[in-house]
Every structure is written in structure tokens, then in C-alpha cells.
Amino acid sequence: MQSRRGALTTLVGAVALTATPFGPLRAQTTTNGTLRAAFLPDFAVAPVFAAQAQGYFADEHLTLAPVAIEGGGAAMIPALVGGDFDVAYANPTSVTLAVSRGIDLRILAASAGVTNQPPSTAALVKRAGTPYSTGKDLEGHQIAVNAISGVQWMVARSWAKATGGDPDKVTFLEIPIPAMTAALDANRVAGALLIDPFLTVALQQAQKYAVLAWPFNVVYAYIPTGFWVCMNRLVETNAPLAQAFVRAFRRGVVWVNENRGKDALIQLMASYAHLDPEVLRKMNIPPASATVNTSRFGALINMMLENKLLTKNVDLAAQVYTVPDRSS
């Protein structure tokens, strides 16, 4: 099975041969006040849907056309480069890899990331009663991640090393997140890196599952878990639309943070993510961020280099598009 990073490398490599940093594969410029947005339906995109529901995009004379896309950055970034979308929410490793290969992406907004204190929205889960608690314990065992060479894989390897283990002695299996608990049940893996809502559902079954560790809190704290990105050509040719998106997004962040733990946010997330509101109420939903925290970009780059996802340094901070508030 080709990993998602492998697919992204292939697709981005093909794009790099046929597109300049400022030009799409086919000429297409957004001039009608509409932005086509690709997203994964999780809690991190709530500010965009809040901005849409509360009329913040309308206030900016902007129409957002969101489309849910499977496959993450491996599918979104080539589609963004090709002109199928104007903005996309993609994982940091896919964005960084694309930038390293000459794709001129601009970062418009970012998720806040997790803190260094659990609980969070992702955990390494084991069968209840098994003795594993460190990377050293997992040497010679198998761990489920959603994509080989993806963010989960990278974080799991770095956590294993940070807790005394040799990540090369741990076998990582690429298993879809909804199927991970079944892999645990079948004793196919010793641990599975679950994210919400699947994490919350699993931990409600204390007789079957328990937290082995919180890898993201240990090695990935305060690093954004996703970026809203566009091609530089949008900034160059239609900066008012990019700026309008960011301003509306920031207002959406304020609304989300004001409504954490309230029914309004639960119902909003249930509507676009198609999740059970009762599960959402039990989730640990982190605050949203109105700014892009570049202070932890170096940690992300170093982790990618250490795990051989990158072969050279990348100035990711240079790709952040700064949008002043109207009052500035």
C-alpha cells in the first residue's frame, strides 16, 4: 500500500514539473467573491463553519463553498495547486513537504495544537490490563497509525524515542482510524493512535480499552495540527479575498471559544461533521486560535528531519500570510 506521504510526493513532484510558483496547471482566478474550500470534517475547522453560520463571511462580501475531501493533504494540496480549490485545510507535514518541493503555499490560519498537559484529542490506546506504558515497552510490537509517514506515524516514532525506545524496533501498521479498535480487539496491535471522536468512544469502554500514553502532548505540544493554506497566486492576484477569509475566520475563532461546552457549538459541529451530539459533549474540544504560532515551527521541522520526512530545512514561517485587522 502506498503511504499518503508517498502519494503526496508523487503528486507534488508531478505538479512541480508543470506549474510555476505563481501559476496553476490551468488558468483560473477567483474574482466573484467565492472561495472554494477543501476540508476534513473535524473539530479544528469549526471556526470556518461558525463564520459561515454567523454571517461573518457575508459581512466580508464573501461566499464560502466548502467541500469535504477524503485523503487529507495528499489529496488536497495537488487539487489546490491544480486550481480545483482556493483554500484548503491540510496537515502540517503535507504542507511542509509541499513547500520543500517548491510549491508556493501561503499559510492563512492554523489550529492551536495541543498543550503539554493531557488529556487531548489524540491518545495511544491499548487493551485494558496490558502492561505497556513506554516506547521501550513497545519494541517488538505493532502500533496502528492512520498513515505511514504521516503526522501520527511521526509523532508515535518520536514519542517512542523520547520514552526510551528504538522506533525502528516498533512496527507501525497503516490502519484506518475507525478500524483501530477492532485491530486491538483481535490482538493484531499492541496500541493504536486514536483521535476524536473515536478516542472518546473507546475510552467510554473502560473494561476494554485504556490510555497507554499521550504522545502529542509529550512531543508535539503547541505545534499546529493543521493549516488553512492557499496558493501564493491567490494572494498575488486576489489579496482582498484572502484577507476577507482570514478576517471572517478570526471572528469565527472568537465565536467558537465563547461557545466551548455550549450546545450551540455542539450542534454546529454535529451538522458538518455528521457526529452524534452526545459524543461531542464528552469530547475534550480545545480552544481555537486566531493567530499562527510560528514559534514551534522549528520543532516541527526538526521532527520531520529526524524521521526522514524531510532532507533539508524549510523556512515555513516565511510562508505565513500576515493579514492586519481592519483597525490596524
Image (tube, rainbow, N blue to C red):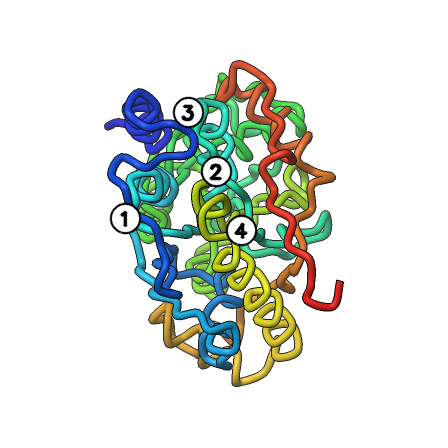
> Mark 1 sits on what residue?
84
Nearer to us of marks 2 and 4 is: 2
Measured Cα–Cα span from mark 2 to mark 4:
27 Å
First in residue order: circle 3 vs circle 2: 2
Q: Quadrant of residue 243?
A: bottom right
Q: Quadrant of the N terminus?
A: top left
Q: Tell me the crowding category of disc 2: few under 14, some 14 to 19, or many 20 or more residues within 10 angstroms, Cα based.
A: many
Q: Tell me the crowding category of disc 4: few under 14, some 14 to 19, or many 20 or more residues within 10 angstroms, Cα based.
A: many
Query: Is residue 205 positioned above or below 113 on the image?
Result: below
Measured Cα–Cα span from mark 3 to mark 1:
37 Å
What element does badge 1 sit on?
Answer: loop
Measured Cα–Cα span from mark 2 to mark 1:
15 Å
What element does badge 2 sit on?
Answer: strand
Query: Is residue 43 positioned above or below 277 on the image?
Result: above
Which of the pair 303/50 is nearer the observer?
50
Do residues under tags 2 and 1 come within 8 Å of each other at their CB atoms? no
x, y (%) of residue 79?
Answer: 30, 42
Nearer to us of marks 3 and 1 is: 1
Query: Is residue 275 positioned above or below 184 on the image?
Result: below
Q: Which mark is residue 171?
A: 3
Task: Please name the amino acid that badge 2 sits on.
Answer: Leu
Q: Tell me the crowding category of disc 1: few under 14, some 14 to 19, or many 20 or more residues within 10 angstroms, Cα based.
A: some
First in residue order: circle 3 vs circle 1: 1
Seen at 59% across and 65% down, the residue is 247
Nearer to us of marks 1 and 4 is: 1
> Mark 2 sits on what residue?
105
Q: Using residue 225 as the reference point, say whether residue 82 is left or right of it.
A: left
